[in-house]
Amino acid sequence: MKENKYCQSCGMPMKKDENGGGTNADGSRTNIYCSHCYVGGNFMNPGIDTAEKMQAFVKGKMKEMGFPGFLAGFFTKGIPKLDRWKN
């Protein structure tokens, strides 16, 4: 299995995930998605169904955490290239 450095949904560094990754339906850990995006085999925010919606969501969260807008924009630029959104 390929080791992902970043969540393939939101782009968060996997080493920053306090739970060590999301979980599959059988409860096993996945290294594809973080625990903020994927739990029990389901995506946590079903309304976020496009890369653009995920970018807006992550930008908002980063601004809440005190990141300047230009940095939040920079860090979310690669979201459309993540595996979940490559269609």
Image (cartoon, grey):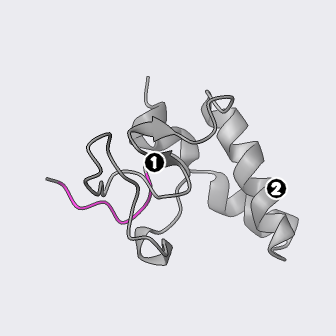
| Dot placed on the residue nearer the N-terminal end, 1 or 2 | 1
Where is residue 43? Give x, y as percent: 51, 38
Residue 5 shown in magenta: yes
> In terms of image quadrants, where is residue 71?
bottom right
Q: Height in image: 2 above or below 18?
A: above
Residue 45 point in image, percent of width and height: 64, 38
Helix, strand or loop status at disc 1: strand
Q: Indicate the amino acid at tag 2.
A: Gly
Left or right, residue 48 beside residue 10: right
Nearer to the camera, 14 or 38: 38
Dot label at residue 85? none
Residues drawn in magenta: 2-7
Spatial CA span between label 1 and label 2:
21 Å
Residue that mark 2 sits on: 60
Other residues around mark 1 within 10 Å, as few (<14) / some (14–19) / many (≥20) = many
The residue that disc 1 covers is 39
